[in-house]
Amino acid sequence: MLFFAILFTFFGIIFTISPKVSWWLSNWWRFEGDAEPSSISLFFYRIGGIIFVIVGIVLFTKFFTH
């Protein structure tokens, strides 16, 4: 479980700081050329990153309290 806590927290921080990375990882296969995400799309990917961080913190606390 510690592995997943680290994984969620790591990716959550990356996706929160740079939601373009998250967008690219999710959509690289859909577009050819220079496709850019919309601002609302980046907003939702950033929210997803925050959720990943929260899940990672919850997993950390579960791991260390047992």
Image: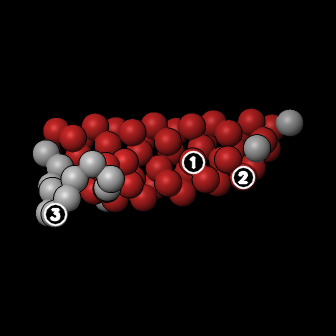
Tell me which numbered mark, 1 or 2, is placed earlier along the sequence. 2
Q: Is residue 29 visible?
A: yes
Residue 6 falls left or right of residue 21? right
Frontmost residue, 66 versus 14 = 14
Task: Tell me which residue sits at (23%, 46%) in the image.
Answer: 42
Could you say which is closer to the camera, residue 23 or residue 32?
A: 32
User: Which quarter of the figure has residue 44?
Assistant: top left
- Tell me the element at label 3: loop
Report, in whole angstroms, how far the alpha carbon at label 1 lies from the one at label 3: 30 Å
Q: Which residue is mark 1?
A: 8
Q: Amino acid at mark 2?
A: Phe
What residue sits 42% from the left and 58% below the top? Answer: 14
Q: Find the distance from the CA under tag 1 to the CA under tag 2.
A: 9 Å
> Which residue is under mark 2?
3
Question: In this view, which residue lies farthest toward the bottom?
Answer: 33
Kindly identify which residue carries mark 3.
33
Among the 4 quarters of the image, the one containing residue 64: top right
